[in-house]
Image (spheres, grey):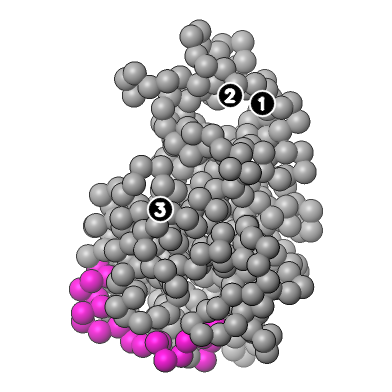
Amino acid sequence: MAGATVVVLHGARVFTGDLLLEGQAVVLEGDTVRAVVPTAEIPPGATVHTLPGDTLLAPGFVDVQVNGAGGVLFNDTPTAEAALAIAAAMRRTGTTGLLPTFITDDPTRMREACEAALEANSRPDSGVLGIHLEGPFISRERAGVHAPGFIRAPDPSDLDYLTALPRRFAAHGGRVLMTLAPECVDDATLRRLATSGVVLSAGHTAATSERTTQALKAGVRGFTHLFNAMPPVMNRQPGPVVAALTHDDAWCGVIADGVHVHADNLRLVLKVKPPGKVFLVTDAMPPVGTSVTSFMLQGRTILRRNKRLETEDGVLAGADIDLTEAVRHCVHSLGVPLEEALRMASLHPATFLGVHGHRGRIAPGHRADLVLLKEDLSVHTTWVGGQARSPEK
């Protein structure tokens, strides 16, 4: 970009999304990565920032499922300002791009949320990459904390609106992700949504493995918080989980917080799925980034206790985690190599959404969206569009 300031970051190790490098400098030009070069080849005249030697510079994290953060819940306030506030709160934890997530709710409010996300996505360097509609076309049997009264089947008006959304978001590189239950939506509707550009994910579902397989053929691309809000695997009823594991092309989002899914189940997913098909999500709620101990969700009190967010009778309601914590859990508790854990929080979700051409790597032409991690894998600094911010700001 002509006239843009050239900034060089050096001194830290660099993980490009593919390789872990020593002695390299990252050259930024405006909001874009221009090059990764040996430190001896730093271009003259650039503004040079020396990073601490015990830090690691990595691609910024991408989270496709964020209900809220920083005290804000998108369902409560489906506005552009709320989406931007959630993105700003999660940016402090290493997430430089996210989908504000709107769970099953009133049809009018769902459209308000979509319009709000469109506005937020249109603002430069907002960190809002589109919208995730988690519901309302889901299973009442596996609703979790979703309000049963708002669960419904799609009607012609829904489909007209939803199939027009991807083109509208595409004007600013945005994406539309929708979680639905395959048993609640027919194949013709799945094909219509997928063909329009909606990224379809199976979740909050009690579908058989056979129905799930049909849905994958009809356009479903992945699975939302695999294992959660799904039936357990049974010997004669393998259900959606086994379909997810046995179809190599299917993507699996997982909540790696030590609460939602047993460690051995996560190890199984990572062992069975092809490399690159498992990515991290937070399913974050308003308490993330705050000290609050409770919040309201569609008239129900959600308590923050024992590293859980749950109703008074113990039903999980999202997660109390950010992606940096999820990366640490993968490395320290699951034995995932650091490079792959970082990819699970950046390159893999970016690829799932189809934005990997400019996110998820530190490479020429990619966005200058970066995270600098300390030795303990906590966040030192993030950059969005080449602009730095420490976690305290």
Give how far across and how far down residue 258 sits, in percent: 74, 67
Q: Is residue 64 left or right of residue 129?
A: right
The picture places residue 144, in percent across and down from the top left corner, at: 56, 84
- Bounds of the magenta span? 141-163
* Three-letter amino acid code at the position of disc 1: Leu
Confirm whether the magenta stretch covers residue 253: no
Q: Which residue is mark 2?
A: 9
Spatial separation of the CA atoms under disc 1 and disc 2: 7 Å
Residue 51, disc: 1
Q: What residue is shown with label 3?
A: 129
What separation in Å lies between label 1 and label 3 (alpha carbons)? 28 Å
Near mark 3 (Cα within 10 A), the count class, few <14, some 14-19 or many ≥20, is many
Identify the mark nearer the N-term, 1 or 2. 2
Q: Identify the image quadrant of the C terminus.
A: top right
Q: Identify the image quadrant of residue 48.
A: top right
Q: Is residue 154 magenta?
A: yes
Among the two numbered marks 1 and 3 on one chain, the one whose residue lies closer to the N terminus: 1
